[in-house]
Image (spheres, rainbow, N blue to C red):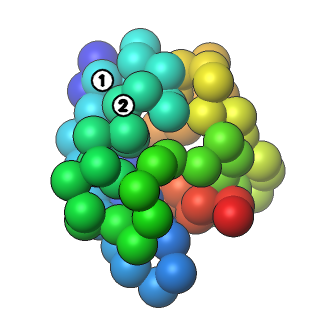
Amino acid sequence: MFIDITIEMDGIRQDIKIDSEQKIKEALQVLFQSGKMPVASAPDYYRSMLNQRLVSAYKTFADEDVFDGDILSAIL
């Protein structure tokens, strides 16, 4: 299932549509390597604004209960 989420880092927001069964780090690595975010690689942890908790980039979006409309704020 595809979900629409927002990735946030250093005040920059990027809206993306992503497969919820992908691992977070692998899915977002392309976004970071393309230069759309202020660092070259995807961080290991994010804060889910919808669930108000820390999520690991090494699990899938579904495993971490990241749902449509969530905002993941990078923890640097």
Q: Quadrant of residue 63?
A: top right
Structural crowding at the residue carrying mark 1, measured as other residues with C-alpha within 10 Å and reported as few (<14), some (14–19) or many (≥20): some
Q: Is residue 46 visible?
A: yes
**Residue 30, image x, y percentages:** 27, 40
Q: Residue at x 38, y 39 (%)?
A: 29
**Residue under numbered circle 1:** 19
| Mark 2 secondary-structure assignment | helix
Quadrant housing the N terminus: top left
Q: Is residue 36 left or right of residue 45?
A: left
Circle 2 crowding by C-alpha within 10 Å: few under 14, some 14–19, many from 20: some
Under circle 1, the secondary element is: strand
Using the image as rendered, state which of residue 41 and residue 72 is in the foreground: 41
Q: Is residue 27 toward the left or the right of residue 36 in the image?
A: right
Q: Are marks 2 and 1 in contact (CB under 8 Å)?
A: yes
Q: Residue at x 46, y 49 (%)?
A: 41
Quadrant of the frame with the C terminus: bottom right
Q: Residue at x 75, y 57 (%)?
A: 52
As measured in the structure, the alpha-carbon distance from the residue carrying label 2 to the one carrying label 1 is 8 Å
What amino acid is at disc 2? Ala
Q: Is residue 51 visible?
A: no
- Furthest residue to the front? 40
Residue identifier under label 2: 27
34 or 50, which lies in front?
34
Judged from this view, the residue extending furthest toward the bottom is 11
Is 11 above or below relative to 17?
below
Which of the two discs, 2 and 1, labels the residue nearer the N terminus? Answer: 1
Going by the numbered disc 1, the residue's amino acid type is: Asp
Residue 10, position as x, y percentages in the image: 52, 81
